[in-house]
Image (tube, grey):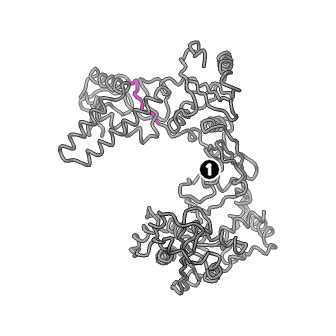
Amino acid sequence: MRDRVYEYLSLRPEGATVAEILDLLFTRPGRDAELGNRVVHSLLAADPRFAWDEGEQRWRLCRFEVLQQPVRQMPFTIVDLETTGLTPDPDGIIEIGAVRIEGCRVVAHFEQLVQPTTAPPPFIVRLTGITPEMLCGQPRLHEIWRRFRDFIAGSVVVAHNAAFDLGYLNLAAQRFDGSPLTDVYLCTLKLARRLLPEVRRRGLDALAEFFGLETSGRHRALGDALLTVEIFLRLVERAERQGLTRVAQLLSLQEQGRDGRPFFSPLPKWQVESLPAEPGIYRFYDSAERLLYIGRAKNIRRRVRSYLSNARGHSDKTLDLIRHAHRVEAETTPNELEAALAEAIAIRREKPPYNKLGKHLPQVAYLRIGNEKPFPRLSVARRPRGKTVHWIGPFRDRGEAERFLKILLRVYRLRTCRGRLEPNPAASPCFQGQVRLCSMPCTGAISEPAYLQRVYAALADLQSGCPALRTALEQQRDEASRESQYERAQRLHEEALFLERLQARFSRLGWLTKDQNFLLLLPGHSSGTVLAYWIRQGQLISRASLASAAHFDAWLEEASRLFPQATPEAIDATTIVAGWLRERGATGGYLFRVPADESERPATL
């Protein structure tokens, strides 16, 4: 338990309260504050690694005591590297630039070209201006390493996107000194995310523009380090206005999650790195071995590794999951589709608390032309269900479906409002009617027969490849061009291209949406094996791993015989398969349409 607290406090130089430590150690901490204080005190007080700050009412690591001093009294070294690539490798460093500041004043510079083991690629030469000729005769990294270590000694290292620079420097220190350079550093990129929420881009150029700074020395190590100094000092001023005056407070601030709480993952990194880099599903468990979450991945190791980073994209629920996941186990599958199906079945059966039913499904959407009488309506739905006139799709997501809907409305002007319509000349049309995207049957502006003609025309157009929609877009585009409305013409041209891409997808996958009865064969794990799936009315009826395609008929015969007693997996298999095919196509697999009447199924493969 002490080691868990030590690992936690290693990421929190400012320390942690008793309540935070209790929350770390116990799934359901009690409410007796006095008992909690005694428990934590008895656990940590005798360990020389920990210190109790009576004034702050926090436990912290003794090695972080020096970080409690004010920022303006702490020496910092701002570091920047130029390298031959993006993968950390000490032999790829071609220039080191560093600026030492004390009392928030620049006191010294360090600038040195370094001869790498391989010449910088042309892109790096163009970006930095550092040519192979300039590097010829320069010292190797090991020759200047001690001088660089002496320059930064006794200071806190600062860098922009520090994980990149320290990835190189810690590997170099491991090689030359036998230990990493530092595990305590400040990152101006992380600090900018916390202190400048109003700024969307936080690269050096974007921050320089935000603060009105000169960027003439960009893409050389010392020039970038000097620019980072200016940005760092302005971020320090921002932090001081929020009452953050100590180094430890800045260190804690940059490690906060998006929800404002400290970011911490008790999941052992060695366990994550031992996961397979293959498709499959993974399960997170808490300290009491309770199942928390089931997920799928194309590459399990890479996906789980992403949970260890304090990414801005993590939702509050994901951050809470990360803080409570203590163990992960993986189950590989032959392909991504099998992973998606296995995930859906496992979630349905095991009901992990951090999974929300339906959220695991691919981001697929459909357009629905309903059977509301007397005026059918258009709407967007996540999955094809219920008795309707027609389903259109699959779309990549709701946004793509709504974009297509607007194109359809401009031509056919069908209604999208809910409920049964009773035409009334005194009715006030909705916004769609006011902007002429609806023929306004609610006001009696169009008769029922005329409206149904529009519906039938739209269905016929959709079933024949949307020629009328394409013609209408092209005419509108040409008209806009003749009237010198070039931006509108460009937008209409992009919509015509968008329509072509959609139609190509609909012609390939549209039958899945319409029939929802099909067989899918994919290569299995081992050579010669075949994975077979039978989807009927959108649900997975049977799946099997066959020794060879020759066993297909026997499996299908058995599945058909047992079908009346079969309990289908209650998952939306159509959406999963459509999402997979949308991304991958039918590469490596075979699809067979099966009529609703199983007696009409294909007799042979």
Left of 556 or right of it: where is 191? left
Give the position of the N terminus as an image quadrant: bottom right
Q: Is residue 595 above or below residue 419?
A: above
Magenta span has 11? no
**Nearer-the-camera pick, 305 or 218:** 218
Residue 410: percent from the left, percent from the top? 29, 35
The image quadrant of residue 572 is top right
**Nearer-the-camera pick, 170 or 526:** 526
Q: Main secondary structure of the magenta part?
A: strand
Residue density around tag 1, few if under 14, some if 14–19, many if 20 or more, within 10 Å? some
Q: In what element is the residue under mark 1?
A: helix
The image quadrant of residue 356 is top right
Which three-letter amino acid code belongs to the residue tagged 1?
Arg
Residue 287: percent from the left, percent from the top? 74, 53
**Nearer-the-camera pick, 348 or 532:** 532
Considering every residue shown, the one lying at the far top of the view is 599
Instruction: Residue at 57%, 27% (x, y): give it.
Output: 590
Instruction: Residue at 32%, 30% (x, y): give it.
Output: 414
In the image, which residues are magenta? 365-372
Residue under pointer 1 = 303
Residue 549: percent from the left, percent from the top? 65, 24
Left of 379 or right of it: where is 25? right
**Nearer-the-camera pick, 211 or 58:** 211
Instruction: Residue at 68%, 47% (x, y): give it.
Output: 292
Residue 561 is at least partly visible in this image? yes
